[in-house]
Structure formats: structure tokens, C-alpha cells
Amino acid sequence: MGTARPDAVRVRRFTRTERALHWVLALGFFALLASGLVLYLPELSVLVARRPLVKALHLYTGVVWLVALALVVALGNGRSVIATVRELDRFDEDDRRWLLGRPSRPGRFNAGQKLNAALTAAFTVLFAVSGFLLWYGERDTRFRFAGTILLHDGLMYVALILLVGHLYLAIIRPATRHSLRGITTGYVRADWARRRHPKWIEELDREPGEAGQAGGQPHELARRQQYAEGNQ
Ligand code: HEM
Ligand code: HEM
């Protein structure tokens, strides 16, 4: 048996369901952004010149998007998603230090990622509610509010800023872009994870049994994969 080569060891970061959820979220968002911009920007509206069609496309994309997100969780490994949501929801001392720019030891997600996840979830709900009101307000004037369109447009601007930051970290910034492997293949290098998310790896090393139970499948698989590959 050869010696373990920690650098080559890969740990499981996301289950297939989590990755599917992310990519359905991203795909729907881009489609809605594109059709929304055609409705929003006069130059594009003139170019496309079929507003009712684009409007219907935008609305139905929104409905299909929400249904698809729910289906991925319902039909896939919902437990792993719930476990991850719990992790994203937990704020500890290291998260506070991270936010204050002090040295910190992040767990599976750092405070920035936790904030990004919370904002994304809130925005998805707010997009859906304001979008529904935009549609329904045309049918029943009691549901037509001046603020609805402002909210929907405002969300788009803030979501766009978040997305630019997200893409920079995921694709360009050398220290973080290895995370792209996690969201595409499900696995990341152990040495990278140890550098970026030391507390997560420590948890996996220290209490594999408990972490497997508390964290659900990702931990379980991470541990198995880690040891299987490490012993090769
Ligand atoms: C469930 C999700 C969504 C639903 C149901 C929805 C629905 C709608 C509806 C009904 C309209 C009004 C169309 C009109 O009367 O002209 C609209 C406009 C718009 N939506 Fe959405 N939408 C959703 C998500 C999104 C997302 C994620 C974005 C961008 C990232 C977006 C961007 C826009 C923009 C830019 C407009 C044009 C507003 C304007 O004319 O000022 N929407 N949406
Ligand atoms: C091509 C586009 C995108 C790429 C390359 C990308 C990349 C990534 C990567 C690499 C991660 C995992 C980070 C980790 O290891 O923890 C991630 C997580 C995440 N992504 Fe994306 N993403 C994209 C689009 C989007 C969009 C459009 C949204 C929201 C509408 C989104 C929302 C999230 C959220 C909430 C997380 C979990 C929290 C976080 O890590 O910030 N992503 N994404």
C-alpha cells in the first residue's frame, strides 16, 4: 500500500442534487435576466419588437424555474440539501471574524457564502412574489401597486452586482476558483479545502461518525472518498 498523498486526495463537496439545484437556479436566473432585460431596455424592446411574446416567455420561465427547483429537492437527495441549508444558516465566531476582516477559520462555507446563499434565497422569493403581482395586477387592479415594479427592477440590479462578485470568485480569482470543480464534479482537492475551509476538513477528520450523521450524505461520502483515494 502506498503512502497517502494529501494533495491528490479529493473530498466530496456537493451531492448531485445540490449541484443540480445550483445549475437549475443559475440557468433559470440567466434566462429570466435575458428576457427581463428585453422588457426593461427600450433599445432591446424595439429590436425584438414582440413584447407580448417576451412577456409570456418571461412569466412562464419564472413558473417553470420555481417548479424545477422544488422538483430537484423533492425527487433528489433532499436530506443533503437540508443539511447544507442548516450549515449555511449557522453563524459562529469565525463567521463574525471573517466579516470584520480578521483572521478566521471558516467551516464548509465562509460568512460571505452564507450571506450570498441567504440573499439568493430571499431574492428568489421576492422575485416570484413581485413577478406574480405584476402579472396578477393586470387582471385585478386591487393588486396593482406602484412599488411592485420598483421592487422587481431593484432586485435585478442588486442580484446583478452579487452575480458579478460570485462569478469573479468562482472563475477568475486564483485563490477561490478551484471551487468550480466542486460545483461541477462534486469534488475538491483536500489541500485546497484545508486552506480555504479548515474547520470543515477538521470536522471530517476528527469526528467522521458524528459528522456523517449531523451533516448527512455529503460528509459521509466525503469521508469515504477521502480515505478510499488516500489509500490508493
Ligand atoms: C418567479 C420569477 C419571476 C416572475 C414570475 C417574473 C414575472 C415578471 C412579470 C409578470 C413582469 C412584467 C412584464 C410586463 O408587464 O411588462 C416582469 C418584468 C421584469 N422582470 Fe421578472 N419575473 C421573475 C423573475 C425575474 C428575474 C430573476 C429577473 C432578473 C434577474 C427579472 C427581471 C425582470 C425585468 C428586468 C422586468 C422588466 C420590468 C420593467 O419593465 O421595468 N424577473 N417579470
Ligand atoms: C456561470 C455561472 C455560475 C458559476 C460558475 C457559479 C459557481 C459557483 C460555485 C463554484 C459555487 C460553489 C462554491 C463553494 O465551493 O462553496 C457556487 C455556489 C453558489 N452559487 Fe453559483 N455560480 C453561477 C451562477 C449562480 C447564480 C446565477 C446564482 C443565483 C441566482 C448562484 C448562486 C449560488 C449560491 C447561493 C451558492 C452557494 C453559496 C456560495 O457559495 O456563495 N450561482 N456557485
Image (spheres, helix red, strand yellow):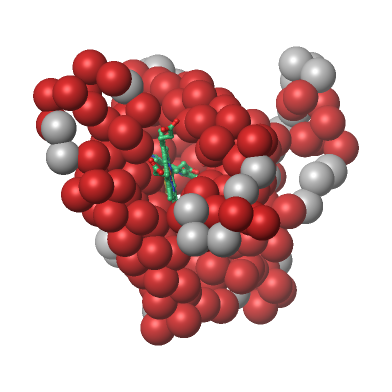
Residue extending furthest front?
141
Q: Quadrant of the C terminus?
A: bottom left
Residue shown at 31% from the left, 33% from the top: 39
Q: Position of residue 120 (x, y in %)?
A: 56, 44
For the residue pair 120 and 12, the one nearer the viewer reads as 120
Residue 182 location (% of width, % of height) = 37, 48
In the image, is 19 to the left or to the right of 86? left
Residue closer to the observer: 117 or 127:
127
Give how far across and how far down residue 21 sits, in percent.
40, 61
The residue at 23%/17% (across/down) is: 43
User: Residue sitting at 84 percent across and 43 percent down?
Assistant: 92
Up the image or down, 183 lies above or below 154; here it is: below
Report ligand 2 position as a quadrant: top left
Work out which residue is located at the far right of the displayed protein and give it.
93
Res. 121 in view:
no
Q: Residue at x 57, y 61 (%)?
A: 140
**Does residue 150 sit above or below 107 in this rendering?**
above
Residue 133, how many percent across, how many down? 56, 54
Q: Quadrant of the N terminus?
A: bottom left
Task: State the residue in front, 177 or 163.
Answer: 163
Above or below, 87 against 219 in this view is: above
The image quarter in which residue 129 lies: bottom right
Asked whether 19 or 218 is in front, the reply is 19
